[in-house]
């Protein structure tokens, strides 16, 4: 049983890759291709890999392809998972950057239901799963505040069509968005909402707020939300309950940020490299 991470990379004509990349410096090596561990699904995978390594777990498997917004890579991944999900044998499946291609997403979910892994969604996959009304089949969503506003809108099937009042809503009022999301349903059992404060909610109730250490310099660094999702994926793969894994992942990401002593020039890779030490400090939490 494996931890499988599926999501595109923004590289034109990047072919389908399924496997565990090698790590060389700042790059993931996927056969003859190099992908920088900067942000997006690459940062998520890198954080998950480091977490698995720290916990003495088998490394995660990455299913990826190139997509520059034209849907090509997303289609490839949907079709690959639909056909090969049983062979991949995921204990945990984390879906990340995928464009909303409704029919292919529904077909993929039909195949996934036969395998029954723990399901996590972040980024574009949150939009996809809410739009096809599959959110309740997931164990965890890890949205940022903007994605949380989309989840909270009962009518939204695509971010462009969110109710107008949500654009005027203070997205720092995460508790209100969480309450509204659970009220209208089509939301997973557990939410980890990433932001200036990290909120963990279960069954409509906020069970933890993680706001320490408070490192304002982390906020503008692209990819820090991706690393949280990578850490929580690996912790769940290790057997932790979803909500406990969410709390530890949020804390670990913040401690890793503090250890990196970030500035405006800091890259997410520098923060991710601190995950092993931060995780060992936070596992008792």
Image (spheres, grey):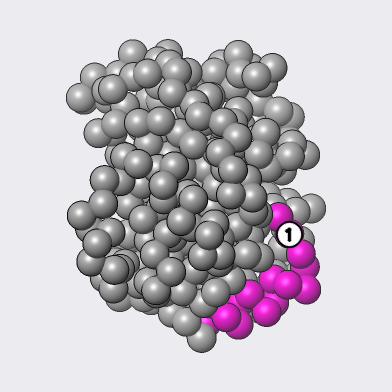
Q: Residue at x 42, y 59 (%)?
A: 152
Closer to the camera in the image, 217 or 133: 133
Q: How many marks?
A: 1
**Location of residue 101 with respect to 89 vertically, above or below:** below
Closer to the camera in the image, 98 or 217: 217
Q: Is residue 269 left or right of residue 62?
A: left
x, y percent for residue 246: 59, 37
x, y percent for residue 171: 30, 46
Q: Residue at x 44, y 42 (%)?
A: 175
**Location of residue 228 with respect to 116 vertically, above or below:** above
Q: Residue at x 49, y 36 (%)?
A: 199
Main secondary-structure element of the magenta-colored stretch:
helix
User: Is residue 264 in view from this perspective?
Assistant: yes
Q: Residue at x 73, y 72 (%)?
A: 113
Closer to the camera in the image, 162 or 240: 162
Q: Is residue 99 left or right of residue 87?
A: left
Instruction: Tell me the quarter of the image containing the C terminus.
Output: top right
Tag 1 residue: 117
Q: Which residues are magenta?
A: 104-118
x, y percent for residue 143: 44, 49
Q: Magenta stretch containing residue 167, yes or no?
A: no
Closer to the camera in the image, 2 or 160: 160
């Amino acid at each position: 049983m494996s931890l499988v991470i599926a999501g595109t990379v923004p590289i034109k004509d990047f072919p389908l890759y399924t496997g565990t990349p090698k790590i060389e410096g700042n790059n993931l090596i996927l056969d003859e291709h190099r992908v920088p561990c900067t942000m997006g699904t690459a940062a998520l995978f890198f954080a998950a890999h480091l977490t698995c390594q720290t916990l003495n777990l088998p490394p995660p498997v990455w299913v990826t392809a190139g997509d520059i917004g034209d849907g090509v890579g997303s289609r490839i991944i949907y079709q690959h998972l639909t056909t090969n999900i049983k062979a991949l044998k995921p204990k945990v499946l984390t879906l990340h950057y995928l464009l909303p291609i409704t029919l292919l997403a529904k077909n993929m979910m039909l195949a996934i239901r036969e395998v029954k892994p723990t399901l996590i969604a972040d980024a574009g996959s949150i939009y996809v799963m809410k739009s096809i009304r599959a959110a309740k089949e997931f164990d965890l969503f890890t949205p940022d505040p903007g994605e949380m506003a989309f989840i909270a809108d009962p009518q939204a099937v695509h971010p462009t069509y969110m109710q107008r009042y949500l654009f005027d809503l203070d997205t720092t009022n995460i508790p209100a968005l969480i309450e509204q999301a659970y009220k209208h349903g089509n939301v997973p059992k557990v939410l980890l909402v990433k932001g200036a404060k990290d909120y963990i909610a279960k069954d409509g109730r906020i069970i933890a707020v993680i706001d320490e250490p408070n490192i304002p310099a982390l906020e503008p660094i692209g990819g820090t939300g991706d690393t949280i999702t990578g850490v929580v994926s690996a912790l769940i793969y290790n057997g932790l309950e979803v909500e406990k894994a969410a709390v530890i992942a949020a804390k670990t990401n913040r401690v890793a940020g503090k250890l990196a002593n970030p500035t405006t020039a800091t890259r997410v890779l520098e923060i991710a490299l601190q995950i092993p030490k931060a995780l060992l400090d936070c596992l008792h939490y």
